[in-house]
Amino acid sequence: MDIEFLYWEGCPSHPEARQLLGDVLAEREIDAKVNVREVRSQAEAEKLRFPGSPTIRVDGRDVDPEGASARPSLVCRIYHKPDGRVSPVPTREQLEAALS
Amino acid sequence: MTLTLATEAPPFDLPGIDGRNHSLDDYADVPALAVVWSCNHCPYVQAWEGRMRELQRKFGDRGFRLAAVNSNDAENYPEDSFDAMRERAEQQGFNFDYLYDEDQSALRAYGAERTPEVFLFDPDRKLVYHGAIDDSREEEGVTQEYLRDAIEAVLAGEEPAVRETPAVGCSVKWKA
């Protein structure tokens, strides 16, 4: 399993998202290396198709496919919870679905 | 440089989404004024803006006013344009002023770094609280309502018990 974790330092949500990803991997006993990469510029965001921080891809597929097509940008990414509220980190359910 | 506690509020004169300009002097009779750096696109702001509405609703009849200010570079972040601000305010039913700091002069004067970031001023327009709205992005996780408690204190003629907290949110988007 190939897991990519892309983040931008200007958004404070990435430690929480990394922790959540680590928790889900541990719970599911998935022994996979997480390739962590910092996105530092708009040019890099465009090259990596980075729609905001954090962006997590499993085998190349975004854990939130709906948000993956947003304009590449150095921003905090918006994730939507099942109840309609927004969050700067993906939901546990999104990560679980992506890793299943 | 961010404003320090007890500093007087720097003047501003900014267009609001209501079609009027709003200056600091327009709030001269307000006993507690919260100037909150904000924007449209940030998930932290979106998570907190319901609580901003609730504070304006709760304390509005006691004279409290909340003025949200968006200074973000709309060229690189078009979701934060003035037109988009109007749309968001309408969609979300904002009951507070939402001002556009296009030339970022207010941002420079206040030194905000995050959205949302609160600057609460007393009747003399001295900074009495700076930082976060409360201690949790998730409403159900809130244990300390910093801004609510600070507004209560100011309206009672007292100093807030907690005067400074770290603002948690998106970075403000400076123009190149």
Image (cartoon, coloured by chain):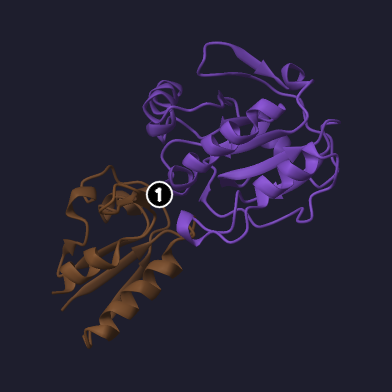
Chain colours: A brown, B purple
x and y, in percent, of residue A43 in the image = 35, 49
The residue under the point 34% across, 54% down is: A44
| Residue at mark 1 | A74
- How many callouts does the rendering have? 1
Q: Is residue B69 left or right of residue A64?
A: right
Looking at the image, the residue that sits furthest to the top is B19
Q: Is residue B163 above or below residue A61?
A: above
Residue B23 lies left or right of residue A37; in this view the side is right
Q: Quadrant of the N terminus of chain A?
A: bottom left
Q: Amino acid at mark 1?
A: Leu
| Among the 4 quarters of the image, the one containing residue A14 | bottom left
Q: Residue at x 25, y 52 (%)?
A: A49
Does residue B102 appear to the left or right of A41 in the view shown? right
* Label 1 crowd (10 A; few <14 / some 14-19 / many >=20): many
Please state the chain letter of the residue tagged with numbered disc 1 in the rendered image: A
> Measuring 82% from the left and 47% from the top, which residue is drawn there?
B5
Could you tell me if residue B77 is visible in this image? yes
Towards the viewer: B81 or B29: B29
Relative depth, front residue between A74 and B35: B35
Where residue B118 sits in the image (x, y, percent)? 65, 43
Q: Quadrant of the C terminus of chain A?
A: bottom left
Q: Is residue B86 above or below residue A25?
A: above
Residue B175 appearing in the image: no
Is residue A71 found left or right of A10 in the rendered image?
A: left
Frontmost residue, A18 versus A59: A18
